Amino acid sequence: MTFADPKNDLAFKKIFGNENKKEILISFLNSILDFKKNKTIIDIKLLNPYQVPKIEELKETILDIQATNKDNEKFIVEMQKKDLGSFAKRSLYYTSKAYVEQLDKGHNYSKLKKVYFIGILNFNMFDNIDFISRHLIINQETTKQDIDDFEFTFLELSKFNKELQQLDTTLDKWIYFIQNASSLNMIPKEYENIKAFQEAFDIASQTKWNKEELRVYDYMGLKEYDEVNSLKTAEDKGVKRGIEQGIEQGIEQGIEQRNIQIAKNLLDVLDNETISSKTGLSVDIIEKLRGHK
């Protein structure tokens, strides 16, 4: 049996963004946020449910979720495999945007509900030792959470190093699944008789995927490989020269040149706004790159 890699953008959204298998995402969210009793999520509405994307219209792996619990709160889940910079700012942007979009024309601020951002990262972003970190708005003097409408949780996959026999919690099992599903050839006994995991493994089984899903999955894997190779080549050469005379202005060495190389690789498959959000480059620079292809 062959399982897809849940870290692949298509596979992640196919597994966790399936409207007909809500138990998977509900279990995942409750385990991450440690929700209990009245806070426990009992139902979800996916504002952008899974569908096979066209290659020329590929977007980021973001799940926009309206959850049903006591407070009817809102959740955003994003999977990010590579450190393209400015992810903290992007998480603030998406959370703020989701918060503001709740308002109607009457600006009744009392109707605003809390927004949770969950970032699943395949790279290290913070100094904490644990793989999970929670970020709140805290009163510096009292250490109380007086402003509680924003909450950020980040999972840094590379900091999770438990083996199968060490999985103690539901969250442990989800992280292990995301990290290792593609290297398994059968469902481990540690996941037996747990409905959400049985369904997740079933969806991840590529024997049930159609040709278009397999094509996009392979394409996204190859695209990522090409991007990694481009980064390595640029780093090996020291990233010492600029990008063509026509875009000399605003181009610096280091991380910006690396992001420009990534952007060039994405010109044929993504629109300017998506490339900008993935690389941190301005839309103006992306347009100049298109003009110098």
Image: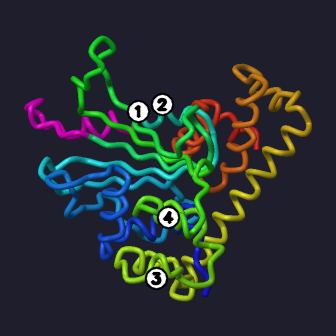
Q: Position of residue 250 (x, y in %)?
A: 69, 20
Q: From the viewer's perspective, is the residue at label 2 or at label 3 nearer?
A: 3
Q: Name the residue type under label 3.
A: Asp
Q: Is 106 colored magenta in this rendering?
A: yes
The residue wearing badge 4 is 167
Name which of mark 2 and mark 3 comes first in the sequence: 2
Q: Secondary structure at mark 1?
A: helix
Q: Quadrant of residue 258?
A: top right
Quadrant including the C terminus: top right
- Marks 4 and 3, Cα distance to the nearest angstrom? 20 Å
Name which of mark 4 and mark 2 comes first in the sequence: 2
The residue wearing badge 2 is 89
The residue wearing badge 3 is 202
Name which of mark 4 and mark 3 comes first in the sequence: 4
Q: State yes or no: discs 2 and 3 in contact (Cβ < 8 Å).
A: no
Q: Which residues are magenta?
A: 94-114
